[in-house]
Amino acid sequence: MIGLKSVPSPIGGLCIRELGGAVIIITETGDELHSLDETGSFIWRNIDGTLSAGDIVDRLCAEYDVERSRAETDTLMFLETLEDKNLITV
Amino acid sequence: MDLHSQLIEKYRALNKIHSLMIEVTHRCPCSCVHCFQVRNNENELTLAEFSDIFGQLRDEGAINIGITGGEPFARGDLAAVIESARKHGFFLSILTTGLMIGRAEADMLEKLRVYSAEISLLGATPETHDTLMNVPGAFDRMTRAVSLLRERRINVALKTTVMRQNYRELQDMKALCARLGATFQANLTVSPRLDGERTPQDFLLTGEEIAAIDPELINGGLIPGEDMKGGAVLSCNAGKNSAAISPQGDVYPCILMRKKVGSLRERSLRDIWHDSPAPFLEELRTLKPEDVADCSKCGMRAYCRRCPGVTYIETGSLTAKSPTACHCAAGIAAGIRGRSGQGD
């Protein structure tokens, strides 16, 4: 269960690229390709192994006009999705 | 359209490099009779320079890199070059003669997760392969390399340039590939040398010889309406989402389209490709299929594998007919007509 104190890191071996403002993630085997939307790309860029989920929510709120409770819910859900897809470790 | 295809289209629309070939060296132990390369063995990029270039390519968004030569393994530091590329997450393939791949080299490619190897196959017998490559023992070393790579689950494609000396062995080459667990690709086009010198084309098949080949054996099958779909390539990805880099850091739109558009020793990739692109790049990016007027309405188009790079070597033009492609298409068409009972 990911919480606000969790510190996510990208797993090794991913091919991560930026294209037209969006983050593209390709798994090491090349079998899966993920194209993130604007908010997902913003969150991904802040997943660096040092920032906690709460830190990322802080940055999200500073960047976008969004209620903190909504930002927390969406960020945690997104991180769980990334973990389920084996793109991050926490 | 799947996500990968959409991604490639987006790269093309943005003129962002998705895939490229990097010649890490022109040194090669072979003297293949049909080789198109014009060797420049001077002043090759160093490992440090490659590392910097890989970083620029990552920032560009590039995903696939083909490591080629010459023979890439002629570089003593090839493992370090590949490792440097892998650190940036590229998907790597290697194009090689297979002559210098032993157990240690295969282990290295596996460890560094090189996705695939493309290896030259010039005949189904040692006599033909070794003669065309001008290296005694080349066939045995190549087949051993394929086995070593397949044992490590590295994808292998054996690629044949079809020539007068080997076209009768195509069926056996295909069977050899099946035995070795490799895919088979045969290409009729024998390119002139990159400097325009045409000696390699002495080995191009005659129209009658092309017509005698089972179309299924060449270019993965040349049945109109199936894999040929749109027919001849009139405007390709070169200079848009694909590129090539020489051992000296010169940038080209494609490995065959030898019009230098910048040097990575003098300018950044971003400057060369985006901020101040050479007029030739601009020309490529605005070229439309209908600009290739003689080809766009040609009745042979369904049988044609025109390559804009080869056309440029042959004619110095991006919009001309390719004499080689026309020659091959006529032979293929005659063969298909003959097989379907429409021959005269």
Image (tube, coloured by chain):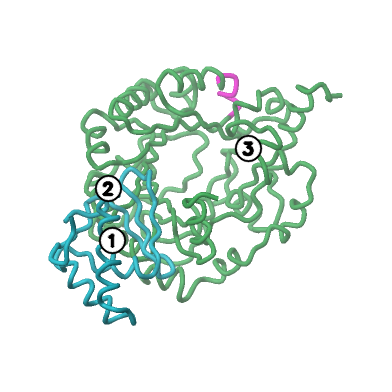
Check residue B168 for magenta coloring.
yes
Cα separation, mark 1 vs mark 3, equals: 43 Å
Is residue B130 or residue B11 the one in the foreground?
Answer: B11
Chain B painted colour: green
Is residue A6 or residue B3 the one in the foreground?
Answer: A6
Residue at (22, 64) in percent of width and height = A47
Q: Nearer the viewer, mark 2 or mark 3?
A: 3
Chain A painted colour: cyan
* Chain of residue at mark 2: B
Under mark 2, the amino acid is: Ile
* Chain of residue at mark 1: A
Residue at (23, 28) in percent of width and height = B103
Earlier sequence position, callout 2 versus callout 3: 2
User: Which label sits on residue B82?
Assistant: 2
Instruction: Give left or right: position of B257 versus B88.
Output: right
For residue A30, above or below residue B135: below
Q: Nearer the viewer, mark 1 or mark 2?
A: 1
User: Which label sits on residue A77?
Assistant: 1
Which residue is disc 3 drawn over? B227
Residue A52: where, in percent of width, then height? 15, 67
